[in-house]
């Protein structure tokens, strides 16, 4: 109970066309006592090997030098926060990997002193940190198979503008094996991904510092050439960048670099900027060590994205959206989640959907499937607290990218959970006639038919699986979409969608119920939720004013007969949104 190595980008600018799409809906709640300050290091993982995702972030209510864990319950709620590690110095960044291959996730920290590894015990606890000295202060950390030996290695961005690459020696230790000089900066952010489409982990890098007398930033791609060799290519300069991330922004099977910035990248360095010149650029991976830069979204004057942008399919239509933490410049600095829905042509809608849950500064966000519903939710660790955004969206119909050639994989969504009977739904698009679509699961061909779309279920064992959907055309060209999922025994926890400016009672789902009655309701507002209330037969039985709660999830013992339920959600602007339901208890 809750409390392809092909030119896939044919884009010539961002789209402002609003198409008919299923808007995301979230059940929101906050806990403003969980952190002492905004945390820009937050990660997810199943640290208990329990088939449920947990969260670890830097900081606690007393200190900014410890790691705090929220143990997931699998229903969108978490156990009380616990301190699980103490590096003893400020941590700039965190990453997650099973470095020693024992089946337990480990934490890799970029600290002021070193790279520090906390090996996991598989029960939510960690061993004492093992330090590996970096050449300079470690600003950021990323994990990938950089040396092609099957072990996850570690990349560090340091405060001298270098990328330090630590080789994982047989899973037992890290050795500094290579260093790539990027630029003479004071802060280096690194993120890893399959930017070249060849399986060799490459890096997106943002170096910030004083260049030509002005503080600014430069974005690079560090290509993995194999055999421990790397090359850095300068991509673009930004007068005032904020952050960088790596992931597939168009579902192509090749990762891209996403950059959020405060100012228009076309404005020369040192030129006066306006408060509204914020946006997100995408450098689309094409293979052959090639990237194409496009402006994906430009923020409206009253909203600003100020964290790393995440490419995620939020509403389940198979089209990648962009999600970032941000704030509203006009509404007393309201902070929350911003979602730019993706279009089928690979562009993004320019007006974001926003979900405010705080009046403090926005911090880092991390996506995860904390209800095991197959939909990605989000946690923001920022301001003076932690905000939870549980994805309650009604799954949209399966769309089709009109980028030729491409595969649109609608189900399952990457990095989500699924029950043992896994539905795979995908569409192919190619201006050259297609001849087949195929599904590979963990490297085994499980489906192959002369179709352009399919919707098929597969029985899979519990655990992690790699799904690769491939399309073919009559010229023998293939194109793919891949995703990783976790299969579990059980059922997804229910959620409740609510349209903006309304409320909804989703459970009980019918007009009759046995006792106790499971009641699930949610409301949606473009202000901050301040209270969620439940009245039964005119009596107030639940009044939740904790954090920014938009929903309630409760079980009530009711006598036999008819009962009248009223759910009310209040917001910071004095708005009240109400839903009613009559239920007969058997």
Image: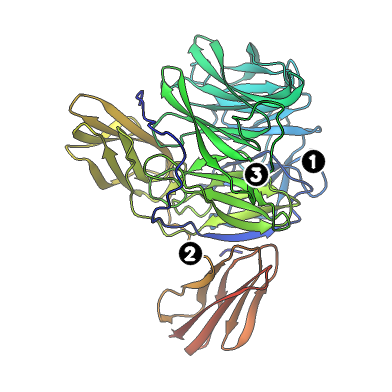
| Foreground disc of the pair 3, 2 | 3
Q: Residue at x 36, y 30 (%)?
A: 8
Left or right? Give the position of 219 relative to 430.
right
Left or right? Give the position of 252 relative to 109.
left
Q: Residue at x 24, y 43 (%)?
A: 453
Q: Would residue 154 be seen by someone viewing this image from the given angle?
A: yes
Q: Secondary structure at mark 1?
A: loop
Q: Residue at x 62, y 17 (%)?
A: 165
Left or right? Give the position of 22 relative to 309.
left
Q: Would residue 188 be seen by someone viewing this image from the given angle?
A: no
Q: Residues within 10 Å of mark 1 (few under 14, many from 20)?
A: many
Name the residue beneath numbered marker 2. Answer: 497
- Percent across and percent down for residue 73 are 57, 55
Classify residue 464 by image quadrant: top left
Upstream in sequence: badge 1 or badge 3: 1
Q: Secondary structure at mark 3?
A: loop
Name the residue beneath numbered marker 1. Answer: 64
- Give the quarter of the figure containing the C terminus: bottom left
Classify residue 538 by image quadrant: bottom right
Closer to us: 162 or 44: 162
Q: Residues within 10 Å of mark 2 (few under 14, many from 20)?
A: many
As drawn, 165 above or below 98: above
Upstream in sequence: badge 3 or badge 2: 3
Classify residue 174 by image quadrant: top right
- Percent across and percent down for residue 547 are 70, 62
Upstream in sequence: badge 1 or badge 2: 1
Residue lying farthest to the bottom in this orientation:
561
- Percent across and percent down for residue 129 are 73, 29
Closer to us: 33 or 394: 394
| Foreground disc of the pair 1, 3 | 3
Name the residue beneath numbered marker 3. Answer: 276
Q: Residues within 10 Å of mark 3 (few under 14, many from 20)?
A: some
């Amino acid at each position: 109970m809750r409390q392809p190595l092909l030119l896939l980008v044919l884009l010539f600018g961002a789209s402002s066309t609003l198409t008919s799409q299923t808007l995301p809906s979230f059940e929101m709640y906050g806990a403003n006592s969980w952190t002492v300050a905004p945390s820009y290091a937050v990660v997810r993982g199943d640290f208990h090997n329990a088939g449920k995702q947990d969260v670890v972030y830097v900081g606690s209510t007393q200190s900014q030098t410890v790691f705090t864990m929220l143990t997931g319950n699998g229903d969108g709620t978490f156990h009380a926060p616990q301190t699980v590690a103490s590096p003893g110095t400020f941590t700039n960044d965190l990453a997650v990997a099973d470095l020693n291959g024992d089946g337990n996730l480990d934490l890799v920290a970029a600290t002021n002193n070193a790279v520090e590894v906390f090996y996991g015990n598989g029960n939510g606890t960690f061993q004492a940190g093992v330090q590996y000295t970096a050449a300079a202060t470690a600003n950021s950390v990323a994990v990938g198979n950089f040396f092609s030996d099957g072990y996850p290695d570690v990349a560090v961005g340091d405060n001298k503008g270098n990328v330090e690459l630590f080789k994982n020696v047989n899973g037992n230790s890290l050795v500094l094996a290579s260093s790539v000089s990027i630029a003479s900066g004071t802060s280096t952010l690194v993120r890893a991904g399959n930017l070249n489409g060849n399986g060799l982990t490459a890096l997106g890098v943002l170096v910030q510092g004083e260049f030509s007398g002005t503080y600014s930033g430069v974005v690079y791609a560090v290509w993995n050439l194999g055999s421990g060799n790397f090359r850095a290519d300068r991509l673009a300069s930004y007068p005032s960048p904020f952050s960088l991330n790596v992931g597939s922004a168009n579902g192509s099977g090749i990762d891209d670099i996403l950059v959020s910035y405060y100012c228009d990248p076309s404005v020369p360095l040192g030129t006066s900027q306006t408060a509204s010149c914020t946006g997100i650029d995408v450098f689309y991976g094409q293979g052959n060590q090639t990237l194409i830069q496009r402006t994906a979204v430009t923020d409206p004057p009253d909203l600003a994205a100020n964290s790393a942008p995440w490419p995620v399919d939020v509403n389940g239509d198979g089209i990648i959206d962009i999600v970032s933490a941000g704030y509203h410049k006009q509404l007393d600095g309201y902070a929350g989640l911003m979602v730019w829905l993706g279009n089928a042509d690979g562009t993004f809608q320019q007006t974001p959907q926003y979900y405010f849950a705080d009046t403090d500064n926005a911090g880092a966000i991390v996506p995860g499937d904390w209800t095991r519903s197959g939909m990605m939710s989000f946690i923001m660790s920022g301001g003076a607290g932690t905000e939870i955004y549980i994805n309650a969206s009604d799954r949209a119909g399966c769309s089709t990218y009109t980028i030729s050639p491409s595969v649109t994989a609608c189900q399952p969504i990457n990095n989500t959970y699924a029950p043992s009977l896994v539905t795979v739904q995908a569409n192919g698009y190619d201006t050259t006639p297609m001849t087949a679509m195929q599904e590979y699961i963990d490297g085994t061909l499980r489906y192959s038919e002369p179709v352009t779309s399919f919707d098929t279920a597969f029985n899979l064992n519990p655990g992690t699986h790699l799904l690769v959907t491939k399309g073919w055309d009559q010229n023998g060209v293939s194109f793919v979409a891949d995703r990783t999922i976790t299969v579990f025994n059980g059922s997804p926890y229910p959620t409740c969608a609510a349209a903006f400016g309304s409320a909804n009672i989703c459970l009980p789902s019918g007009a009759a119920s046995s006792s106790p009655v499971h009641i699930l309701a949610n409301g949606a507002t473009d202000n901050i939720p301040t209270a969620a209330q439940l009245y039964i037969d005119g009596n107030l039985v639940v009044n939740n004013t904790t954090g920014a709660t938009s929903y309630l999830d409760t079980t009530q013992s009711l006598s036999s007969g008819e009962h009248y339920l009223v759910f009310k959600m209040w917001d910071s602007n004095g708005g009240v949104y109400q839903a009613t339901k009559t239920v007969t208890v058997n």
